[in-house]
Image (cartoon, rainbow, N blue to C red):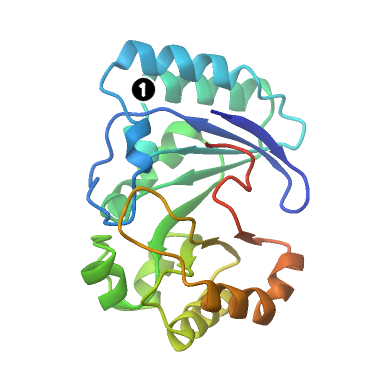
Amino acid sequence: MDRYNKIINKNEREIVLLKSFPCVWGKCAFCDYIDDNSKDEEAVNKLNMEVLKNITGEYGVIEVINSGSCFEIPKTSLEKIRDIIKEKNIKLLFLESHWCYRNRLQEMRDFFNVPIIFKVGIESFDYNFRNNILNKNAKFKTVEEVKEYFQSVCLMVGIKGQTKELIDLDMKLLEENFKYGTVNVWTENTTKFKRDEEIIKWFKEKYSYLDKHETIEVLYNNTDFGVGD
């Protein structure tokens, strides 16, 4: 599995995919990504140390992702990231967090002492689709609630059951309310959810302009950031 890459086409940064402890929620109906988790702290840290050796700091920006939230990365690995931030003069850090950790984000800001862009996977602003179908357990009602805590949202498009109207609203709320965003075009995995090829074709045509957006990124494949498997 690739765990390090340089993103150079837009929003330039280095990205690492680390191992972590099990996801605090771990019940999203569409996710089999959590198979990368482990309770073996020593093994997790050992792997993470090797991955983190790749960081050069050449862009002054790094993104750290894992199969869950940044709060599930072991402290030893977090301390190594903090050391790298100081050594490599990192100016900006991207981290991911589940909605349930929203009241703890300041802990990470205090720990790293560097500006952080927090991403949250909400998949959709539609409450029913997000929670009753995808079982995301992110039970906010308005976009203002999300903006209060997070600077970037991750959305999903192309799952059978989504409508064009639902996706249009998601894109509108993203573009009007957030500087940063990631749109994931659904890639089938071991879960029950299937791709809607018609919706995906429509999305690619209508929202092709996002390919040139400086800070909103569309992942047509789940490995487009160059990490994962």
Percent of width and height locating residue 170: 47, 78
Q: Secondary structure at mark 1?
A: helix
- Lateral position of residue 132 relative to residue 164, left or right: left
Percent of width and height locating residue 36: 37, 31
Q: Is residue 176 above or below residue 34?
A: below
- Lateral position of residue 170 relative to residue 216, left or right: left
The quadrant of the image that shows the N terminus is top right
10 Å crowding of disc 1: few (<14), some (14-19), many (20+): few
Q: Residue at x 36, y 29 (%)?
A: 20
- Lateral position of residue 55 relative to residue 41, left or right: right
Q: Using the rendered view, name the quadrant where residue 43 is placed.
A: top left
Q: Is residue 151 above or below residue 107?
A: below
Percent of width and height locating residue 144: 39, 75
Q: Residue at x 75, y 37 (%)?
A: 59
In front here: 89 or 193?
A: 193
In front here: 76 or 160?
A: 160
Q: Is residue 35 above or below residue 50?
A: below
Q: Residue at x 66, y 21 (%)?
A: 54
Number of marks: 1
Q: Residue at x 66, y 24 (%)?
A: 55
Percent of width and height locating residue 169: 47, 84
- Lateral position of residue 54 relative to residue 112, left or right: right
Q: Mark 1 belongs to which amino acid?
A: Lys
Q: Is residue 28 above or below residue 80?
A: below
In front here: 157 or 68?
A: 157
The residue to which callout 1 is attached is 75
